[in-house]
Amino acid sequence: MTETLQSGGRRRLRRGVFAIMTGGALLAACQAQPSVFNPAGPASRQISNLGWTMVILGSVIFVVVMAYLLYALFRRREGSAAISGMRVVVWGGIVVPLAILTGLFVYNVNVLGAVNPNRIETDFTVEVIGHQWWWEVRYPDHDFVTANEIRVPTGRPVRLEVVAADVIHSFWVPELHGKIDLIPASPNAFWIQADRDGEYFGQCAEYCGTQHAKMRFRVVAQPAAEFEAWLEQQQQPAAEPADGDPAEGMLIFLSANCVQCHTVRGTAAEGDVGPDLTHLASRRTIGAGLLPNTRENLLGWVANPHTVKPGVFMPASDLSAEELNDLVAYLMTLE
Ligand code: CUA
């Protein structure tokens, strides 16, 4: 007897713990960064509201249908039926579903219209080109190219024109918009707007090869003045280091294989296979959003990128430790 009481108590306890854990996990999922439950712009807010409307409506319908099911199972057979069969079919099977689905359809079309890039008034366009496995970011009105980091002015809509250089990728910043495909030779357009300053995590959302999961990026929203200063700085060619390790490093950079793939504006390096490095040191991450942009990470990355991103197209370096040191000292000056 005591044993059954105890095991009953334990079962209840276990159930309680399970309920708390699932609730906690759900809450954590809602708060984790980045989260579709944490919209930070008009487009993502519209999509989030539509999502919640469908979840809540679906839950209500589920509860009502289950209640009718239980009623049908347990009602007493004798006596007159409370609801006539025909009326249930007409109302529950035709009129109400038709009304709800029509309402949802109209709402859906409205949201599609609201996130339509051709409806938005903006004079600011950024081009994003997906590569295996990094993002080329072009500011056509300001004539410079960067990578893996899209800076935008806070509170202003920005039109994004996206295309892929190799295979299909998908651009996704959960807090700013839904996903959009980057397709080779077939540009797509959409727009984002960040309502708060900050950094928004982005991720390729379409399998595109071995390092698909490590094809990340950031959208950085800044106050207008800060953003203008950044634009100004990015348009400048790279500064040439006067002497010391960075000057040595520049010579190594220009004589090594780096120039086959990378550009540093203002130097002879004009490769266009990999990311433009003109202002590499001003970026927050390296390896397509993978690692914080620190000296140690850069050193490890240049020495052998395959240790953190196996299969990446950048080959490991054959430079000596001292040459690597100078090379990274040079890269760190590219602010
Ligand atoms: Cu690019 Cu997945």
Image: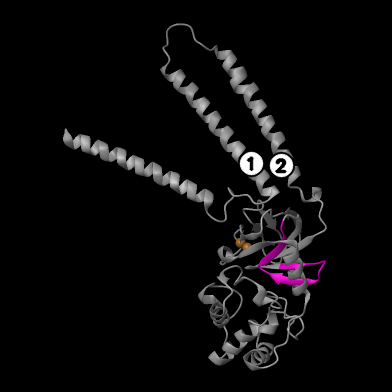
Residue 83 against residue 4 in the figure, above or below: above
Q: Position of residue 300 (x, y in %)?
A: 53, 80
Q: Nearer the viewer, residue 70 or 6?
A: 6
Label 2, on which residue? Answer: 111
Q: Nearer the viewer, residue 175 or 57?
A: 175
- Residue range highlighted in magenta: 137-154
Question: Which amino acid does the dot numbered 2 rest on?
Answer: Val
First reached walking from the N terminus: tag 2 or tag 1: 1
Q: Main secondary structure of the magenta part?
A: strand
Residue located at (63% from left, 26% from top): 97
Which quarter of the picture shows residue 99?
top right
Mark 2 in CB contact with mark 1 (< 8 angstroms): yes
Residue that appears at 68% across and 74% down: 275
Q: Residue at x 48, y 6 (%)?
A: 80
Left or right: 76 as drawn, with respect to 333: left
Query: Label 2: how many residues lie within 10 Å, few (<14), some (14-19) or many (20+)?
Result: some
Kindly state the secondary structure of the residue where label 1 is placed.
Answer: helix
At 37% from the left and 44% from the top, the residue drawn is 18
- Circle 2 SS class: helix
- Would you say residue 324 sits in the magenta stretch? no
Q: Is residue 10 left or right of residue 138?
A: left
Quarter of the rendering containing residue 122: bottom right
Labelled disc at residue 49: 1
150 in the magenta segment:
yes
CA gap between label 2 and label 1 equals 9 Å
| x and y, in percent, of residue 262 in the image | 69, 79
Against 137, is 34 above or below? above
